[in-house]
Amino acid sequence: MDQKRLDRQMTATRWIFIGVVGLVTIAYAGMGYMTFGWEKFSDPATWGQVGDYFGGLLNPIVGACTLYWLLVSVRIQRTELAETRSALEKTQLAAEEQVKLALLSSQIESLNIRAAFISDELSHVRASRLYYVQCANREHGTISKVISENGKYEDPLLLIKTDTERIKELNEVRMVLAERLTALVGTTNVS
């Protein structure tokens, strides 16, 4: 039930109630005057009887209006409760969606960090390989021993082979990370 319609009904009920009370009062006063005259109404006991009479007439009317508005308020509350449930369900779905997006975002960030780490390691391995190649080509083709990352003197050609294998491994890991990242971004866009 919309608010304007409810306000119109309340206003109409109020005016009907005021009209009924006024009409009953005027009718009773008119009947009393025609039947008894004004002398009978000067007695306080008569006013008590008049009050009882009005109470007897108006109590059922007031009770019926009260029951009507009680039923209207229950209906309004039921409607509002259904709307509130619907809104809460929508809010819950939105919150669940936000949690999913936050999880995907953190996974994407984690993959980006790992990819950056692998890129840095690849740069370092490539630089060391270049150093080893330069050492291998130095002094008219004689190969001198170089100090590897673990602190031992080693043949640069062997280190070049090891670094080449490590670069291959890191590139494979980077490709897997790129595929996972693409899959996660695709999942985020679909949702």
Image (tube, rainbow, N blue to C red):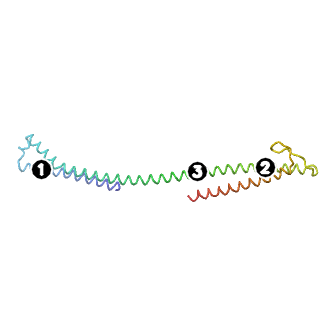
Residue neighbourhood size for the residue with mark 1, other residues' Cα within 10 Å, grouped as few (<14), some (14–19), many (≥20):
some
For the point 38% across and 52% down, the residue is: 81
Kind of residue indicated by mark 3: Leu
**In-image side of 84 versus 56 (left or right):** right
**In-image side of 138 versus 11 (left or right):** right
Label of residue 125 in the image: 2
Q: Does dot 2 land on a helix, a strand or a loop?
A: helix
For the point 90% across and 47% down, the residue is: 144
Location of the N terminus by quadrant is: bottom left
Residue 149 % position (x, y): 80, 44
Kind of residue indicated by mark 1: Tyr
Kind of residue indicated by mark 2: Val
Label of residue 28 in the image: 1
Residue neighbourhood size for the residue with mark 3, other residues' Cα within 10 Å, grouped as few (<14), some (14–19), many (≥20):
few
The mark that comes first in sequence, 1 or 2, is 1
Label of residue 103 in the image: 3
